[in-house]
Amino acid sequence: MENTKITGDKIRNHFTYSLWKYILFAVIAVFGWNLIYTSTAYRAPKNKRLDLYFVTYSVPDESLNWFKQSVLDLLPELEDSSCASVVYTEDDNYYGSIQLSTYMGAGEGDIYLMARDRYEAYVTSGVFIALDDAIADGRLDLRGIDVAGEVHTDENGQTGVFGIPADTLYGLYDQSVDARNMVICITAYSATQDQAIRYIDWLIETMHTEKPDWYIEYEASLEQAKTTPQISDMPSY
């Protein structure tokens, strides 16, 4: 007759050879619960959320959280907001371009603050809305920002101002956002375009601060670089 008595040796032997099964089961259980929670968790509809994407140098989480809270404070009719950082620089732009294309292809993001070369690559495709009416009726107060060079014609034949230069919004630097050569725009697929205009107007008002001393020095260094003769390496004979 088989000995079915449970002993300490049997228990130790069982866990010696079967412990991996319990670990695997625990991992599957945790993963499955997380998947169920994520897929069934409530997500605010697109007309009740405003999402911002920063396509520039990496923006820290505390700054992203600050922008998210500012959206919800300014626009209490919204239920949610998310702010994401897409790393895109002169030295690191390959994956940023792919990530940006993926987000836009999926209809993600209501407001984009992006590098000018990316903006100009998209602006004629009709992915952004013209802001002329909002500027004309005062909903979008530019506060002296020059948009004369921002007139484009998209693939639908519409001509207008599709983006606002962010270079002079020096307050963005206080939130670790490098705004040099950046443009702010609103996507044509956004379900909260009116709220996006209100937020950009607030952003311009809030971030339109005095030019900091370090920025003045930065501009001076650029001018000096332009006027400094470049000495080429000449072969010696």
Image (cartoon, rainbow, N blue to C red):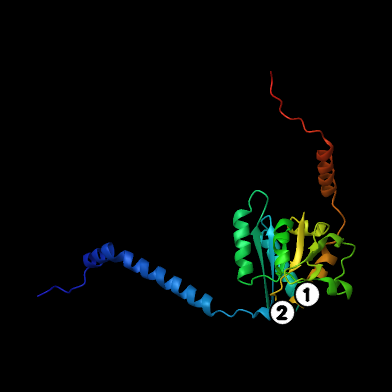
Which residue matches tag 2?
78
* Side of 196 where 213 appears, left or right: right
Neighbor class of circle 1 (other Cα within 10 Å; few <14, some 14-19, many 20+) is: few
Q: Secondary structure at mark 1?
A: helix
Q: Residue at x 82, y 35 (%)?
A: 228
Front position in the image: 70 or 56 = 56
Residue located 83% across and 57% down the image = 168
* Residue drawn where x is 61% and y is 69% of the image: 105
- In the rendered image, residue 219, in percent from the top left (x then y), is placed at 83, 46
Give the labeled residue for mark 1. 74
Q: How would you rate the neighbour count of disc 2 (Cα within 10 Å): few for under 14, some for 14-19, many for 20 or more? A: some
- The total of numbered circles placed on residues is 2
For marks 2 and 1, give the CA distance: 9 Å
Q: Nearer the viewer, residue 51 or 137?
A: 137
**Relative to 219, 52 lies left or right:** left
Locate residue 55, reporting x and y percent: 68, 60
- In this view, the residue farthest toward the right is 144
Residue placed farthest to the top in the image? 237
Residue 111 is tagged as none
Q: Quadrant of the N terminus?
A: bottom left
Query: What residue is rendered at 78% in x and 33% in y?
Result: 230
- Above or below, 77 against 71 in this view is below
- Image location of residue 116, percent across then percent down: 74, 57
The kind of secondary structure element at disc 2 is loop
The answer to whether residue 56 is left or right of residue 150 is left
The amino acid at mark 1 is Leu
Amino acid under disc 2: Leu
Rendered-image quadrant of the C terminus: top right
Asked which quadrant contains residue 64, the reply is bottom right
| Residue 187: % across, % down | 71, 71
Say whether marks 2 and 1 touch (CB < 8 Å): no
Q: Nearer the viewer, residue 168 or 100?
A: 100
